[in-house]
Amino acid sequence: MHEHRGDIVNSLVHLTREKEDNSALEVLCQILSDGELIGSRKKGFIKGPNSAVCFTETPLSSLKHFATKSEQKEDARYRFYGIALNKEGAFKLGARPVIYLPDNEGDWIPKEQKWRHVRYEYDKVDWTHEREWRKKGNLDLTKLVGIYIICWHSNEIEQIKKSMSKEVAKKVRGFLPMLHLNMML
């Protein structure tokens, strides 16, 4: 349906960042070892009683606008470490686009669906550039047909491979070193 739209992609990306004393790369390696993306709660701006895993449908060529490599201490929320997956597969597992609207207009959203609501206040609070999707709860990576691993540099691939569980390793279709891709995209 969207094959002729350069701004619409068939993938979703989950990016990581530093967590406590772990680098974004270490966080990614732990995810691949566990085989699961763990849903965020209120600290991750998730509303309601449910946790949710967050994704962006931003094309790979545009990730450089809100992610950065770990050594850069910029204000970017994310680093170039994460997982890319097929949007259709994620949809079948319950992933949905978020609903952007002011908090005071979200009363109609059922409590069980609040995980999809993202606050939007024109010219004050705007996350629409993230083109966010969410999946309620956790996401078992082994239930996906395949995944691509996003890293900063190709010299990190061996470390990442060593961290993966056997089940997750079977799902990996390739690696996307963003240092190299950013130069081409």
Image (cartoon, grey):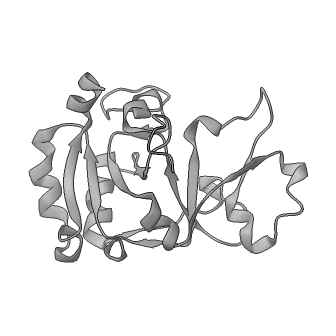
The image shows residue 36, relative to residue 61, as above or below, that is: below
Name above or below for residue 148 compared with residue 34. Answer: above
Q: Residue at x 89, y 51 (%)?
A: 105
Q: Nearer the viewer, residue 126 or 74?
A: 126
Percent across and percent down for residue 133 are 57, 54
Q: In this rendering, is residue 120 above or below 163? A: above
Name the residue nearer the viewer: 96 or 82: 96
- Hey, which quadrant is residue 167 in on the image? bottom left
Q: Quadrant of residue 115?
A: bottom right
Quarter of the figure with the C terminus: top left
Q: Residue furthest top?
A: 183
Quadrant for residue 163, please give it: bottom left
Q: Position of residue 2 (x, y in %)?
A: 50, 46
Q: Residue at x 74, y 35 (%)?
A: 125
Q: Is residue 39 left or right of residue 150?
A: right
Give coordinates of residue 24: x percent, y percent.
33, 47
